[in-house]
Image (cartoon, rainbow, N blue to C red):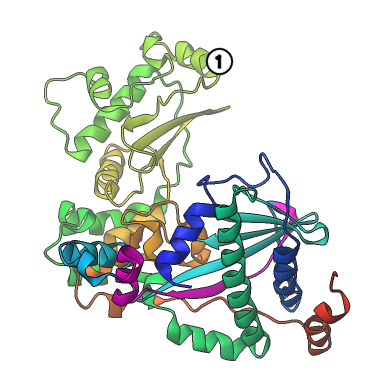
Amino acid sequence: MRQLVLDDIIQRIFSTVGFSRGSDEQWQSAPKQCRQWQEVYDLLHGLPPETRAAKASSLYWPHIWLSVQRESWEEIKTLHTDGNEADIVDIKEELEGDWQLEYPYEIDWFRAAFELVGGTLYFSLLPRESCLLLKLDQYLVSGPLDLDDEEVRQGFEDYTDWATTALRQELERLLDGSDAYRDALEQRLPKRERYGKLRRQDFWEVASDTEHFLRDELTQEDVARFIAISDGLTGDIALRDLTLNDFLRFCAICYEGAGYDFIGLTPRDQYLAKADGRHDGLLDITPTSSQALRDWFSVGQRGGHPWEIVRGGNTTHISLFLSQYDEGYKLLLEGSAQSRGAETIRIALALWRHNIPFELFQADHLKRMADGEDWIGVVPHYFGLAPRYCEEFFPKEDRIHEFMSVLSLEEYPGLEQLVEWYPLERINLLAPSDLNSARNFNKTNKSD
């Protein structure tokens, strides 16, 4: 199997991209293919599955890596011209360029994922949008594929032949020795498929000509002062008898600290100019009445964003939360995105200078960012060039909240060698006695 052919088969048989598992299932009979998948499933019994808290009723197995070679140029010409060399003369340059752009790697890598839910085995080939559902004991398959269509059925047979053969080979190698298998895979798997971490300070030094918000928007005095006070920004002291005008005054202090040019504007007008706008009726209450603010809180949140004092995206806004307690109110400042980190730090310094008690969300993270001592997570190429929400893929102890694509490393010579790459997942095997039983499982439990 080659990359272009595999893509063609996947697009043909998985016609509904993004198929949602368990929805609109239509089971179809495929005895031969189910027997092939059963052989793979038998080998999986040599690996102890795990459960996850979010889905305690499901069993998961470690991902199995599969590699696919790219077509040679001769194969590409044959696929596009039926072997007639004369047909390719006029389009050779364009065709070759498109082929190399679409398939830039000599070897492409996929992760085979298995999950057992009840009596149904789910198989996914990541990062492709493809998922198969298998009821092996009943010879049934489901997914966004129509096996009554001859072309789809042939594609499904080819896909199954390739996937099950490749998986059996990899699982046999793995069962022969987990550590040796992982060591060999460590040598073969390219960096573009891996996770790593990079010190922000190293990034600043190598990419010295690139704009860095934290490095370029803060003075050394700002950084030193912030590091000195950050551990004390806990918000332990409550604020009493606040009014709307008090909150708007806090916002004005924040805007001044951030460096916004609001000369001549009232605190209310500053808020209107910079905040999200969905204030949940907060601006409609009597601005000088502490009772009016208490009454507004008693109604509860209405779905707006009154505390988003600097509007932005899901991760690039700055908020100044006002929370009500029995003894008064507390302020929480939040804005830890690296593109907003310098503004948040300057805001924190401004509130501190005005002796306003507040808590800074992720203060330690911002401190390490400002000092360049935090880690930037490096994610595989298939996350795209602007990865977000990747915390789950990194150890919690590394406290990684910002990410960059491994592809971005190519822009800065010398940066890749400074990345600390995480080792591949160690796949445990069953005890020797259980492992022997698992290897012989298919001999005694085969369906006819």
Residue appearing at x 76%, y 82% in the figure: 430
Q: Is residue 132 magenta?
A: no
Horizontally, is 275 left or right of 36 in the view? left
Quarter assignment of residue 321:
top left
Q: Is residue 57 magenta?
A: yes
Which percent across, then down, holds residue 242?
42, 21
Q: Which residues are magenta?
A: 55-83
Q: Amino acid at mark 1?
A: Val
Residue appearing at x 31%, y 62% in the figure: 102
Q: Residues within 10 Å of mark 1 (few under 14, many from 20)?
A: few
Q: Is residue 356 above or below residue 27?
A: above
Q: Nearer the viewer, residue 197 or 163?
A: 163
Q: Nearer the viewer, residue 129 or 73?
A: 73
Which percent across, then down, holds residue 263?
11, 25
Q: Which residue extends farthest right?
A: 444
Quarter assignment of residue 200:
bottom left
